[in-house]
Image: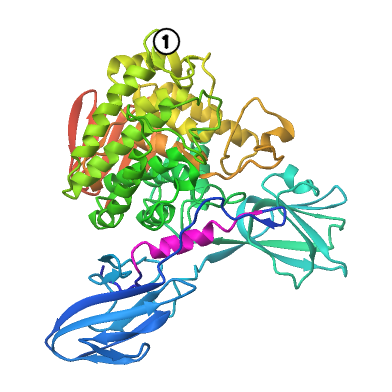
Amino acid sequence: MADVYWLWYPGDFSIHQGMLQNFQREERSMDWPAYWYIDDCNRNVKFTRTYTLNRQTEFQVFARGKGYVDINGSKYPLNQRTTCQPGKNIVTIFIGNPTDLPAIYIQGDVICSNDGWQASNFVDRLPAGYDPLFTRPDQDPNMIKYQTILVQHQKKVTKNNGVLFDFGRAVNGSLHIQTRIAKSITLCYGESETEALDVKNCYYKQENVDRHSSIRKRAFRYVFVPDVSLNDVEVTAVHEYIPKKNNSKFETDNQLINQIWNVSVETLNLCSDVFFIDGIKRDRWIWAGDALQANLMNQYSFFDEEIDKRTLLALRGQDDIKQHINTIVDYSMLWAIGILNHYEMTADLKFLEVIYPKMQKMVDYLIKQTNDNGFIYGRRNDWIFVDWSKMDKQGTVAAEQLFLLQTYRAIITCGQALGKSVDQYQNKFTVLQQHLEHYFWDEDQGAFIDSYESGKHHITRHANILAIIFDLVNDRKKRLILKNVLLNDQITQITTPYFKFFEQDALCQMGEYRAVYQTILDYWGGMLRKGAVTFWEEYDPSQTGAQIYEMYGDPYGKSLCHAWGASPIYLIGRHFIGLVPTKPGYETFKVTPHLDNFDQLHCILPIKNGEVMVDKVDNQLTVTATRDGGVIEISDKMYPLNKDVPVSITVQ
């Protein structure tokens, strides 16, 4: 940490901003706070560091809150130059803020707010938190500064006795309005043209607007102004964003797959500013299931570690647990699984040290909700979600047990990385795995049933998909699941991109690359053929007309820019290019390409502290990595990858 940052109690910036994020939802002129318990930051924090100086030095403390500086027991005011004498100096800064995030910025040649400070909430003491967004003393970490770009409309047409503006892309921001008429106007927003033109039912509408009106930040592609003529009004969009670098590139001789990749990246980008949020129009909340998938996609595109850390901290909140994350049992488990993925992606032990105690309390909370068989069950006010699909949820549910098994695996791996004892979790894992197969595996049907307590022996895809992607059954059962469930059209199809992600992941793991490639073209390509500029929360190819925008009983309840819709990024990067870390932080990594569907391809994917470039022209494959530690695996042969040395292989 060479630079100087604003400091706070670790996690508090994310928790405070996460609280604000979860109050951003608006529906038809009503504000809609998230419907779960929400933590806020600590209000009283002290920062401590010991310096041994060989000369006198000065520093100045800028603060967000009230407090003072203590040097070896002597007190000094904030915001003035303070002197430290040679020798040992214990510097302690006390900051309280009853309304916002308590934070400090220390400016000095020697004493400054960089790595090494400890923060205490007067109960626990941990390394102080910071974020690369805040590096200057004139900034306020209570205020997120977005950058803006003006977006001009691509089309402006008269329609339905009004004017329709089409900006040609998804915008997340506000509007500049110019009118040439005396009367006020109405703004009707839409992710689709159909929604914007529905003056009565559109999700966002602002009435009585004139040139002096404050226009709220919203997400839209279209804006309709009813009861005006073409020259009466002009509208310009102001898109807001936090810059981040797209570290990936994907180009092939198939323009549709190129477009699917690019729209996936745009979808993820829009849903990834301070946090991974579900979608930019409707909820704008932070959901653990969406966040897990967003991080997996992020790993193959932006490789933005900070967004993932902020999201994990915001989702969890303070140490005490009052309910499941987002009230959903499986999302509490997906949050813990997300920590494992973050560690394997980054090898960030400092972050793991901060979040592991929270992870351990969460897993212990889950264990208290298990029965004598080790099965986790839903309690009053718990939501057993899994997916928007009909399944037998009577009693304990198979999919939840598979999530719990992977949660145990996550805490075992993370605990071992920190040198913690994990025997109790290993024992829980072993018992649960045995009972899962005994109670939920139906040998006659060759698949996992949803619930054994109902006696229905009903099969859906979900538990069977999870058994494969988490590698929790043997090869024989995987093959049975593939035949009897994944390739069986009699089993109810999945319509959400959320679980479509997991399903295609499982099919790739079973070698069904051609089928997955065709699904990407058909399913995600199907959304493009229906005019999508970003990918949706749900897509049912059989739906037509205005019903394609309906969800949750709302004619425009479906999010048309939803983070989990961007899954082709992960599917292509993880399975078709075949890039995966084999040790945390890509200390070692492997490229196992499956590129039969591509005649020509140029792809760049990020890894920790580097990138991997893959080129294919006909049957000639070339792979280059910018760091050591990699291997290429093709047809059971291994080819070492050395830094900046291209490896060319002739493939069949």
Secondary structure at badge 1 equals: loop
Q: Which residue is mark 1?
A: 445
Above or below, comparing residue 503 to residue 646 in the picture:
above
> Which corner quadrant of the image does residue 506 belong to?
top left
Counting every numbered tag in the picture gives: 1
Above or below, comparing residue 494 to residue 420 in the picture:
above
User: In this orientation, which residue lies closer to the viewer: 476 or 270?
Assistant: 476
Work out which quarter of the rendered image holds the N terminus and state it. Answer: bottom left
> Which corner quadrant of the image does residue 447 belong to?
top left
Q: Is residue 370 magenta?
A: no
Work out which quarter of the rendered image holds the C terminus and state it. Answer: top left
Q: Amino acid at mark 1?
A: Gln
Identity of the residue furthest to the top in this view:
444
Q: Is residue 24 magenta?
A: yes
Above or below, comparing residue 56 to residue 266 in the picture:
below
Spot occupied by residue 440 in the image (x, y as percentages of width and height): 38, 19
Spot occupied by residue 159 in the image (x, y as percentages of width and height): 83, 48
Q: Residue at x 65, y 25 (%)?
A: 542
Q: Residue at x 28, y 22 (%)?
A: 434
Q: What's drawn in magenta, residue-wise?
A: 9-26
Spot occupied by residue 96 in the image (x, y as percentages of width and height): 40, 77
Give the class, few, some or many, for how many residues have Cα within 10 Å of label 1's Cα (few <14, many ≥20): some
